[in-house]
Image: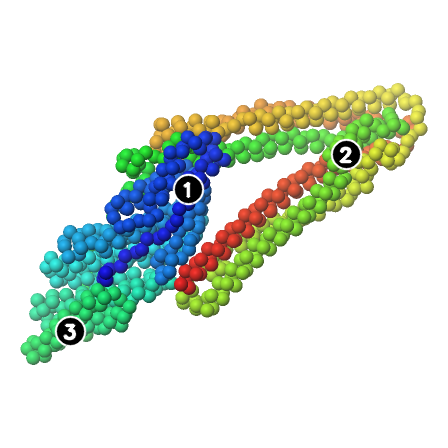
Amino acid sequence: MSSNLLFVPYRKTKRIEFSKELRDIISKEYYQTATVFEADLQEIDTLRNDTIDLEVSPQDLALLKRYYIHLSTLESKFPRDVVEFPWYGTLGYNVTGPVKIRSFTFERINVLYNVASLYTQMAVNQDRSSDEGLKKACLYFQYAATFFGYINKVAEQDEHLTLPLDLQKGTIETLQLLSFAQAQEVFWLKATRDKVKDSLVSRLAVQVSDYYTRTLTNANRSEGFRTEWIHHITVKKHHFQAAAEFRASLVSVSNSKYGEEVARLYKAKSALGLANSSIRFASEALKQDLQGLNDVVTDTLRRAEKDNDLIYLQDVPKTLPDIVKASVVKEMEISDFTKPNESLKTGNYGKQLFKDLLPFYVIQTAQAFRERQDEYVQRHIIGPVKALTNIMNKYIVERGLPGSIDAFDKPQALPSSLLDHNSEIKSQGGVRLVEETIDDTQRLSLEGERLLEGAKDRLKVEAGEDELLRTRQGSKHWTRPTSEEAAAHLTKRIQDLQNYLRQAKKGDETIRNQYYNIETPLKILASSEEKIMEFVPNSKSQQLDPSLRKSILSIREVLNRAHKLEVERNNFIETVEVKSLQYNILPKIVSEYKSIQSNFNDLKVDSNTFEPVFQKHIQNFSKDIDWIEKQKTEQREVEDKIDELNKQFMRLKTSQGVSSSREEALKTLDLVYTEFKELKLNLSQGLQFYNDFNANCKKLIDDCDNFVYERRLEARDLES
């Protein structure tokens, strides 16, 4: 049936595996069992499915409201991107989509849109021949405007959400203004039937025209509206300008201002002429309304001109004072939607779903604190302990130990420490592992380059598509942001990753040079005992001076003490790692959360709320840090003793002949062993860097793909 008012059609969706997605993440990420929440999982499926095929009734409104309220509470319990929601646009000539976005906010916006849509449809369906029907229609349009306005407020809460064209701010503002315009129009209609004073009816009408004017301005900035709607709104704008001038002319007559009456009617006739230029695509009901007003204005103008020319002889003014607008519509109270948690407490919408499920931010907070604990342990305990040991080993090697004493003490056999180093290097893969790791690092670096090029290529393709369409459509109609503006955040990520990669390549070069500098002696140290003996020349066996023998034994004793420190530290590190693994902060976070919920129900809870819990928790590692301080003191004593004894040894050895080439060979192999351990650590860190780097690059590729997909959907909407 033809109508002189517009309604907004429902957006469409389809069934999804809502409960399965929630069930899966509870099983994977939460420390609770999904089967406990089986009834809630089934209920959320039912709530959503009940809103898919809507009719137009208060019962359907109740279904949407119930689903929205429960949906809103899920955001505090689950990750925002856990479920992908598909929605189809229906505002243009053709159904578009589906647009699929993993976002509870996106789902909420679509539900709010359908609530607003339902109100517009209920408003249009009212019997406007009765006072009650007019009151309801006016009320429903105001509710529609309120919900459209609330959509933009919800969208602003999620700065990372990219909405399709028909849900973007400009489109939604247009629909809000259209709803206000139609609410004001219905009120105007009731005023005319209630025989309200012409002056007030005129003011109401000019306000209707103003709302339609603003609606039209917004609609013309978007490509998402049908031509019929644009013409409808244009006709309404001029129709009510004419109606306002006509009613103002009646006020002029009552004040004996007959020249002004004619001037007002001229303006009304001019506005009707503008309306007629857009009437072609309007509905039959709107054409009839316009024709009726046109007939009245034409007849009245003919009579007014005749009377003024023959009887009153008043001048017809060239300019007229503006009619003062009178708005009677406003946003409505929708606290059930804006405060869903409070709404649930009323008991009108059933029990809260997943009430006993820990909020995901609590899980996230515990996981974040777990990572902070690992970082704390690594930075303040494990890292310093390893650094202490490295300093101590370098201190020993820099003094030529134990090679210099081994050259005297074992002039022909290989020192046991050297054989231990040989066995350790071979058990860890030796030179082969080092070279394979260097190759793996190079391969991962090239893969990172390829991924970054892939990300840049995707943005380049999208920019080319946008430029082509912008040229074809013209910048006036192609109003969306340029590719450079829209992809700025992705371009920044690419540039940052490129900078990291450049720095990493410099580090790779340093590591390769570190290996090349020790490659030859490392291959010897990692080879057979026979080849090591070939590298280390024998010295002639001889009787050592007693003082020199005593000096060597003293050095070996303090070196054994240093080795004992290293063993103790390795055991300490293993103990701390086990302690850190078993020392879980989650129970403390949960306990604090429950305490807050019981005693401070209105307190806003976030990660900062639990910071005191973490600070207290981390103090359990204070004894371990104290142990490190004691180690520093003991190491200084060991180093001082080594330095003292080594100086004594250096003075005594000059009187005893020994092969300097053997001593230098042993020193070289000791130094190579120390360099090997450092090289192995650097290579391990390099591999970890590239694995993390490439994971970030792959995430960037996915984000670029999503960006291109969304831009293509947006472009399709603009073209349709």
Of 710 and 662, nearer the camera is 710
**Secondary structure beneath label 3:** helix
Mark 2 and mark 1: Cα distance apart in space: 54 Å
Mark 3 and mark 2: Cα distance apart in space: 106 Å
**Secondary structure beneath label 2:** helix
Residue 611 lies, in percent from the top left, at 46, 32
Q: Where the C terminus falls, by quadrant?
A: bottom left
Circle 2: residue type: Lys
Circle 2 residue? 426
> Splitting the image into 4 quarters, where does residue 254 fall?
bottom left
Circle 1: residue type: Phe
Q: Is residue 56 left or right of residue 458?
A: left
Q: Residue furthest left?
A: 311
Q: Is residue 482 left or right of residue 577?
A: left
Residue 549 vs 121, above or below: the answer is above
Decide: few, some or many residues near mark 1? Use Cα within 10 Å; few <14, some 14-19, many ≥20: some
Of 671 and 284, nearer the camera is 284
Residue 272 lies, in percent from the top left, at 21, 71
Circle 3: residue type: Thr
Residue drawn where x is 93% and y is 28% of the image: 540
Tag 3 and tag 1, C-beta contact below 8 Å: no
Decide: few, some or many residues near mark 3? Use Cα within 10 Å; few <14, some 14-19, many ≥20: some
Q: Mark 3 vs mark 1: which is more N-terminal?
A: 1
Residue 496 lies, in percent from the top left, at 57, 50
Q: Where the N terminus falls, by quadrant?
A: bottom left
Residue drawn where x is 52% and y is 53% of the image: 704
Residue 80 vs 574, above or below: the answer is below
Q: Which mark is residue 18?
A: 1
Circle 3 residue? 298
